[in-house]
Image (tube, grey):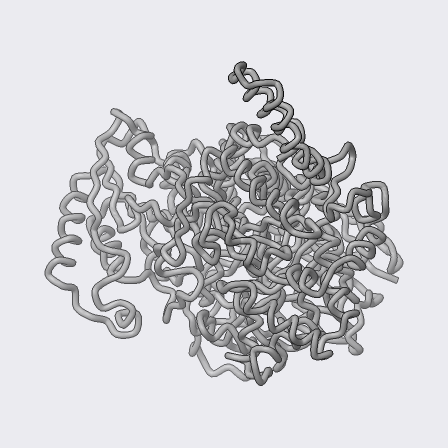
Amino acid sequence: MNLERILSKINFIFDHKPTIPPMKKLLLLLLLLPCFTFAQQKNIYHKGWIDFNKNGKMDVFEDPSQPIEKRIADLLSQMTVEEKTCQLATLYGYKRVLKEEMPTESWNSEVWKDGIANIDEELNNLTSHTDAAPTQYSYPYSKHAMAINTIQRWFVENTRMGVPVDFTNEGIHGLNHDRATSLPAPIGVGSTWDKNLVRLAGNVVGREAKALGYTNVYTPILDVARDQRWVRVVETYGENPFLIAELGKQMCLGVQEQGVASTLKHFAVYSVPKGGRDGSDRTDPHVAPRELYELYLYPFRRVIQEAHAMGVMSSYNDWNGQPVTGSYYFLTELLRQKFGFTGYVVSDSEAVEYLYSKHHVAGSKEDAVREAIEAGLNVRTNFTMPQTYIMPLRQLVKDGKVSMKLLDSRVADVLRVKFELGLFDHPYVEDPKAADKIVHNEQATAMGLQMNRESMVLLKNENNLLPLNKSAIKNILVTGPLATAKSYATSRYGPSHNPTTSVLEGISNYMGSDAKVTYTKGCDVIDATWPESEIIETPLTTQEQASIDSAVALAKQSDVIITVVGESENQVGESLSRSGLNLPGRQLKLIQALQATGKSVVMVMINGQPLTINWENKFVPAILEAWFPGPESGKVIAETLFGDNNPGGKLSITFPKTVGQIEFNFPFKPGSQANQGGKNGWGNTYVNGPLYPFGYGLSYTTFDYSNLQVSPQQENQQGDIHVSVDVTNTGQRKGDDVVELYLKQELSDVTVYEYDLRGFERVNLAPAEKKTVEFTLHPDDLAILDKNMNWTIEPGKFQVMIGASSEDIKLKQEFEVK
């Protein structure tokens, strides 16, 4: 209690008790005099600085005018081993590890009485079937900001050194908080190919985080999804390192422009577990050293060096026998010495323990702690109390197995981020009430809606069936197991409790009284024998046949059939591997029965990974890929089907025809995905080509490319190459096009990719409008790993290729590097 509050209480007593004798008033004042002194001593808030260590003077680390490195050194010199080790562990938030919503007296005897590195997902009211965390403090938004201030104040005022907490939270679908602005799943974000919009989305995520009291957001995911069977494809931007790096850079910049840290994940080589299986495996990626650098490390290097990400999350898996979280090579040599990372590394949950329990490279949990901190890990995260890591670490320091120099180095990285975030100058949300106007406001909602619109990818449109003519349609059948679904819009790593519009609701609202909209489910997402039915065909039950028959009967009375199929959140995502990539359950049977009616069938796909929809592609006239869209999904899908939104998204990942083709992706080495034939071929023994290639997507209009210019025609190894091309809307509708630039090196000392993406721009064009799209190829875009594994630009000829997809190349021009 400060002096002002004490005097206020005394005045209140005197004003309301006028009969107190003067001597008693004097006695009361004398009794309270120690409180005055106490209050003066404990008043740590001063103009321009905060007395975190409560010693009554401005120390170097408390002085905002001092360089950050000097402040870190001064703070470290005053910290005990107990305080230092507490800066190397995560405390999971309420309902996960924390049992109390607000600080209690019991906190004074918990390990975090000496501080804590970060508190993760605190009071965010997550809805998840794995770990729901309801709380009264998540909404209104201002209530959460005030709650975070209360918790932060406890650490600043009640711990000896007062080191502020870094409040972390997930953010790949939008900020992981009750009713925050939602984004489509990252695979949908990747399908927008819109750098400016992703930057804006990052701004929204960062702005909302800061307003709510979060200071560090776990986004973006930079995993390169090269195996379509991997069920976390839904959480990635796609399969191409350049596309991922460009979009990830914009997301990171957008978040950090708001004064919030962006933590990249999952470092590294996490996205290619053996056979695409995800779960307890999460290990054994079969990746050659050259691929490691060219594919899987490329986005991390680019985003760290160009956007200066303040955080990195280390992954569960191993590479070449080295578990990443215990690898000095990954966490120090690569991350810090080669890429220049200066922030702090946080482990994915239980990654440290896996060194002992799964990888068996540590003989005990204590050894796992030692290996992780020696490798370069800063902060351990797990769904257990932080002392399960802190106490073994303290013992290792006491026993001399972890040096004080090493401990100080790891703590310094954490403190550096806290200083850079301004937590030692402004530890609290300065205007909590402003959160109610900032979070999920009108502008943020518009951004999320636009992201949903731009993520739509038109896969097929035979005879221009789409867009549907609203005025010519009187009866619409909406069917399919996902027509009324909504839960796919809520992710474990994104916002909760936002109202969601289903596809049926979206179409019904769009049509109003202009047409009759009928619905029947048709079938479930999965059948009673799934997942066995993915490998053994089982007969339909009587109920399943009746449901399909009901849909067929209604279809015969309809002008058009909109069938909404795909996967629910229970078939795709972390630890939910599938045995195949066909539509699960009886969904193909439903589509075949509907197609047999002779009516026009439009297939809307809601799914998280590429599906092998071969029959559907051959016989269904129109297919729209919606991925896992956000809460506005029904509205956006209806707008797209009827032409108010012209789909302009492009696939950021290849659709194979069968899992037997996998790995099948872009870029690829010469001949690795070639059709069978030639002098060694003996006939048609193999399914050739992708179902839909990388970069593919149709539109309701058409585009033409012309006037490709490349300058200079000859360049030295240090110069930029400038490329321009004209694109014209040659159709009748306004629409978006993604102009894709690919680069081919014609001769090299090592085998390089056939060609690769090195530029893209999404442009909006009215009918007959022409725009000149410009690109700059930097030396890094031309570099390859030479025989000695050094990045080198080799002299020789290069070919610039402009395409509408990786397979639909429109224009080519050559230049030479001397």
Q: Nearer the viewer, residue 459 or 587?
A: 587
Name the quadrant containing residue 289.
bottom right
Q: Disc count in the image?
A: 0
Q: Residue at x 86, y 56 (%)?
A: 714
Q: Nearer the viewer, residue 683 or 688?
A: 688
Q: Position of residue 362 (x, y in %)?
A: 59, 82
Q: Position of residue 691 (x, y in %)?
A: 45, 61
335 shown above or below 361: above
Say whether residue 641 is visible: no
| Relative horizontal placement of residue 110, taking residue 463 as reference (left or right) | right
705 shown above or below 582: above
Q: Nearer the viewer, residue 461 or 196?
A: 196
Q: Residue at x 31, y 46 (%)?
A: 485
Q: Position of residue 341 (x, y in %)?
A: 75, 59
Q: Residue at x 42, y 70 (%)?
A: 659
1 shown above or below 611: above
| Relative horizontal placement of residue 795, taking residue 732 as reference (left or right) | right
736 shown above or below 126: above
Give the quadrant of the C terminus.
bottom right
Q: Nearer the viewer, residue 389 or 723?
A: 389
Q: Residue at x 51, y 28 (%)?
A: 442
Say whether residue 502 is visible: yes
Q: Position of residue 570 (x, y in %)?
A: 35, 59
Name the quadrant containing residue 364.
bottom right
Give the quadrant of the N terminus.
top right
